[in-house]
Amino acid sequence: MAVEDLGDTVELTFPSSPKTRVTILKYGATVISWKVADVEQLWLSEGAKLDGSKPVRGGIPLVFPVFGKSAEEGFQALPQHGFARNSTWEFLGQTTENPPTVQFALSPAEANPEVYSKWGKGDNDFTLFLTITLNDDNLTTKIEVSNSDSKPWTFNWLFHTYLKVNEIEDTLVNNLPGEECYDQLIAETYEEKSPAIDFTQELDRIYRNVSTDKVVQVIELGKVVHNVKRVNLPDLVVWNPWVEKSKGMADFEPKSGYHKMVCIEPGHVHDFVELKPGESWTAEQIIYKGDAIKLQSI
Ligand code: BG6
């Protein structure tokens, strides 16, 4: 069976390659594992809570309707990264057999009421459809945000993807030179000068308005380990918590786990997207295998 509903999780298996599979937790519609030919591609903390008591530390948590914290009206009361990652989504079922594709939905009826009520005046009517497709060499996550309200509202979207690496100190992320970068650690904006980003300490940056023609590659010891393609997602957050920040996160285990991960997070976070009543917005993240280094300058 290509798609199995296991209760708390849904599992997809690629028909001609049964060791290529993806597991999605209904809580947060969080992808918690993606294996290609039995090799795990995502990092999941050993201390991650999978029981719905807090957002999952690892995999692909979904960030909506705010990235981080915002002082904007209608967002101040929301906790960091909003409520999509701490709400249990409705599993709508399988939409195609091959490649296996499934859909999840979130609307005010399913949203975590404690958090949802803090967005705007607590009554923004919305529908999210998440479509996940497993191919033999890629995982595609597509989001559709619809305004079912009689008033306009605004939002951020972000796929908070934790990619697995063997050793962060051997890892580079390319194709960002020349891009505008907001460094969250020093609260400064500058132009990225490095031909490739390397990791020697905590790093938390938002690359803004990066052309979606650019595929960002994660390269380890000269080999491409992940390619990240974006559709309608202009921004890219790159994050590694390193030693001290990892220590401060109770669900980040083992504490040395920062060596094994890098977050590459495609989103729309440099401003809020506005949706009028009846309007929809869609975007996609495609993570794929493929070992050719492709350098794309500005
Ligand atoms: C990243 C942010 O996207 O998420 C970081 O850039 C933040 O600043 C990280 O620390 C983790 O956030 P959280 O809420 O999952 O601990």
Image (cartoon, rainbow, N blue to C red):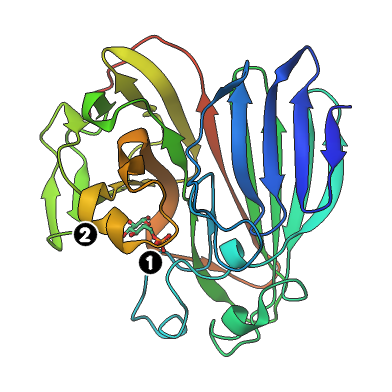
Mark drawn on residue 223: none
- Which residue is farthest right? 1
Examine the rendered structure and indicate whether residue 189 appears above or below residue 68: above
Examine the rendered structure and indicate whether residue 252 appears above or below residue 123: above
Q: Which residue is mark 1?
A: 68
Q: Decide if ligand 1 comes within 8 Å of the CB at mark 1.
A: yes
Instruction: Please say if the residues under marks 2 and 1 sit with CB atoms less than 8 Å apart.
Output: yes
- Which residue is farthest bottom? 121
Q: What percent of the width, then of the height, locates residue 201?
A: 16, 44
**Foreground pick, 154 / 262:** 262
Mark drawn on residue 184: 2
Residue at the spot 43% in from the left edge and 45% down from the top edge: 266
Residue 297 in the figure: left or right of residue 113: left
Residue at the spot 69% in from the left edge and 39% down from the top edge: 23
**Foreground pick, 231 / 118:** 118
Q: Is residue 203 visible?
A: no
In the figure, residue 147 lies in which quadrant? bottom right
What amino acid type is highlighted by mark number 2?
Gln
**Foreground pick, 160 / 216:** 160
**Foreground pick, 109 / 41:** 41
Examine the rendered structure and indicate whether residue 298 appears above or below residue 44: above
